[in-house]
Amino acid sequence: MGILEKSIKNKVVIVTGGTRGIGFSTVKSFLENGAKVALCGSREETVNKALEKLKEINSDFEVLGFSTDLLNIEDIKKMMDEVENKWGKIDVLINNAGISDNVSIYDQDDKHFENVIDINVQAVFNCSKIAAEKMKKNNYGVILNTSSIVSINGQKSGVGYPTSKFAVNGLTKSLARELGTDGIRVNAIAPGIIATDMVAALDQNMIKAMAANVPVGRLGEAEDIANAFLFLASDMASYISGAILSVDGATVI
């Protein structure tokens, strides 16, 4: 058993947005390293499908699934209470749920912008608040957030998304300072262009053009982000808090 696996084994982990893409890969990676994982999705159908896929990979995985409204504090409390009652603690929260946005400011109304901020920022705050309250009792915990490469330089259209990720960075750094004395570390990962199912559906020539602009010569894989989450959740990162880790192949957009 390697150092990383020893550090992750038997940790209790919650992953929001855990039914597909980066989230699903992260859930799978933690399970493969011996963690107990609760995955959250927006719909019961997608949660059940993800659970089925994981059980097909390994029927011994210790995994729970929840279709939780991340904008409802009581719903989050109920979910985390169930996790705590099942496994006795919550060690790691990974706030991965989010929505993208590329609609021009000329074509969106305030409700469109508000929805992006709600899902990408308010939900992160809600989950972090409830998790921190539980982690504080054990003087131990790790909160990890999914930011984005666009949180560094913005993007050309869809102002809500980079705005939300700038906010996630600020929340990450501020909570790291506030919660450190309670034994809780807080970090974020800023993924670059990742070959998720959405990207895979694009024209192959477009994908090749995107990859050509990445200095390391390829698009990122969901596993690249999952590996970064594993490291930051492990005790090998015990002195890292308040960091925004870019995992982007040195891409500049």
Image (spheres, grey):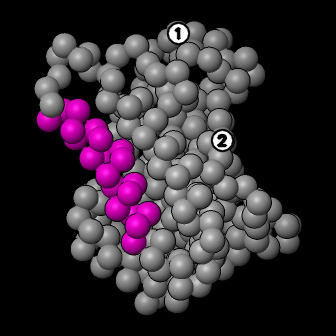
**Would residue 63 be found to the left or right of residue 158 on screen?**
right
Q: Magenta region, mostly helix, strand or loop?
A: helix
Specify the amino acid type for callout 1. Asn
What segment is highlighted magenta in the picture?
111-130
Q: Earlier in the sequence, mark 1 or mark 2?
A: 1
Q: Please state, as top left, top right, bottom left or bottom right, where the C terminus lies in the image.
A: top right
Q: Residues within 10 Å of mark 1 (few under 14, many from 20)?
A: few
Q: Position of residue 124 (x, y in %)?
A: 40, 55
Residue, disc 1: 205
223 or 90: nearer the eye? 90
Residue 115: horizontal and vertical position, in percent?
22, 41
User: In this picture, is 238 found above or below 105?
Assistant: below
Could you give the CA–CA distance between mark 1 and mark 2, rounded to whole angstroms?
29 Å
Which amino acid type corresponds to the residue marked 2 in the rendered image?
A: Leu
60 relative to 44, above or below = below
Q: Residue at x 26, y 16 (%)?
A: 104
Instruction: Name the residue that disc number 2 marks.
Output: 245
